[in-house]
Image: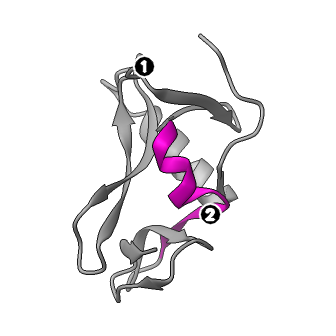
Amino acid sequence: MEVAVISAVKLTVGAVEEIKRLMGEPGFDTTQRLRVGVKGGGCSGMTYVLGFDMQEEGDEVFEIEGIGCIMNKSHQIYLYGMEVDWKGGLNSRGFTFSNPNASSTCGCGTSFAV
């Protein structure tokens, strides 16, 4: 298995802490990696994918702060330079995406257009 030195995306300190907390939950499948990607849909055309998954053929493998990550190589063009953050507040709780490649985003912040 080949591991890339430079990743297309960045995780903030808050995102790293939350992902590691999730990975430390009882019953977490340690054979899975954090998948970062996109899929068609959402109110702006494409939706972000962030979740734990098994590595597939065509995936780029990389590591961020000790977190094993995977991304379909074809998704890099949409996600290069993106920053994932974790907001733990009462009004806005969850992962947020700051993508310099997005020409527009929706109000919910989970879909975008290029």
Q: 81 or 91, which lies in front?
A: 81
Marking on residue 83:
2
Marking on residue 68:
none
Which residue type does callout 1 highlight?
Answer: Thr
Residue bounds of the magenta highlight: 73-88
Q: Secondary structure at mark 2?
A: strand
Q: 14 or 79, which lies in front?
A: 79
- Confirm whether the magenta stretch covers residue 6: no
Measured along the vertical axis of the image, is residue 58 above or below residue 71? above
Say which label, 2 or 1, has the lower sequence index.
1
- Confirm whether the magenta stretch covers residue 76: yes
For residue 2, side relative to residue 107 (left or right): right
Quarter of the image for residue 62 reads top right
Residue 107 % position (x, y): 35, 89
The structure residue drawn at horizontal position 66% and vertical position 32%, both measured from the top left corner, is 63
Quarter of the image for residue 1 reads top right
Marking on residue 30:
1
The structure residue drawn at horizontal position 61% and vertical position 63%, both measured from the top left corner, is 82
Tag nearer the camera, 2 or 1: 2
Label 1 crowd (10 A; few <14 / some 14-19 / many >=20): few
Label 2 crowd (10 A; few <14 / some 14-19 / many >=20): some
Asked whether residue 92 is in view, the answer is yes
C-alpha distance separating marks 2 and 1: 24 Å
Q: Secondary structure at mark 1?
A: loop
For residue 75, side relative to residue 99 (left or right): left
